Image: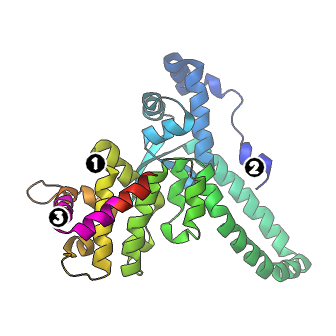
Amino acid sequence: MSNKEAYYFSHDSNARQDDKIVALRMKHGWEGYGVYWALVEKLRESSGYMSICDYNIIAYDLRTDAALIKSIIENFRLFSFTEIENLGKCFYSESLKNRMEKKSSKARESANKRWGREKEMQTQCERIPNAMRNDAIKEKKSIVYNITTNSINNLYNYSFVKINDFHELYKNFEFERKYLFLAYKFWEIWNKENPNQKTLTDAKISKWYEAIRLIVEVDKQKPDKLLGIYCYFLKCTSKESGFDDFWFKTVKSVSAFRKKDKDEVYYLDKIISQVNDKIAKDQDFSRLVQDTIKKFNK
């Protein structure tokens, strides 16, 4: 992608005079106007030109207030909304999508004309195999870069199965690394046991990262508790006696930790209780958990 394509897209020169933009400026001033265009730029960089409605993460990325982000997105009819399976509520700009679709249509027309020339077609056919190989290599090398340097909302473009080098990703990750670490480690042990299960092959980094964040920041569960569960599940994978694998086999994603049973008790609380009982009775397991926590907190 050229610098021009990456950092510029067309828009109306008189956009600031649009009624919806005027209403935005009346409420939030030029700051709101600037944040609006920053949001449009983020959508331009995102897959499908849409983004998850996680206002806290967007605010963190743009270094502004979540309430301002929410107001701009929801209150001025500047954006539209849709529900996407496994992602939840997302927002997008109709005008941006229309512009990009027109651009794509023109690009396709231009490509068809080029491919219509017999000589050019022959040349292109010779180039395709090498180009595909080069693109595949570039994609593998760029996954870590894209995940760590773009908005965290772009994480939903990637599944865990695409990670070739987790340590490199972890080292360059710009957001909360500990959440990423926990999400990946739980996915890793479940995936080893169930490599063909769709829940795991389709597992999106953003969804698992966000589930860990909610458990820690909203549910107020310490990462130490999750590490205890992780250690317990590791024992389940090795089929060690004394470790009940019911929850390991029942729960297949970190978001499922936040589900409740018929008595309105969180699965997470029930699993933590089971782990705590084992820690109290098994000194070797207790040491394993403590050592894991120490390494995690270094």
Nearer to us in this view, 98 or 74: 74
Image coords of residue 2 (percent x, y): 79, 53
Q: Is residue 113 left or right of residue 183?
A: right
Q: Is residue 194 visible?
A: no
Residue drawn 82% across the image and 68% down it: 113
Nearer to us in this view, 18 or 52: 52
Residue drawn 32% across the image and 54% down it: 224
Asked which secondary structure carries label 2, the reply is helix
Residue 273 within the magenta-colored segment of the rendering: yes
Q: In the rendered image, which residue does mark 2 sit on?
A: 5
* Residue 275 found in image quarter: bottom left
> Which quadrant of the figure contains the N terminus?
bottom right
Q: Earlier in the sequence, mark 3 or mark 1?
A: 1
Image coords of residue 129 (percent x, y): 77, 82
Nearer to us in this view, 5 or 257: 257
Q: Which mark is residue 221?
A: 1
Image coords of residue 291 (percent x, y): 36, 61
* Span shown in magenta: 272-290
Q: In the rendered image, which residue does mark 3 sit on?
A: 274
Q: Residue furthest right?
A: 119
Residue 166 within the magenta-colored segment of the rendering: no
Query: Which amino acid type is marked by label 3?
Result: Gln
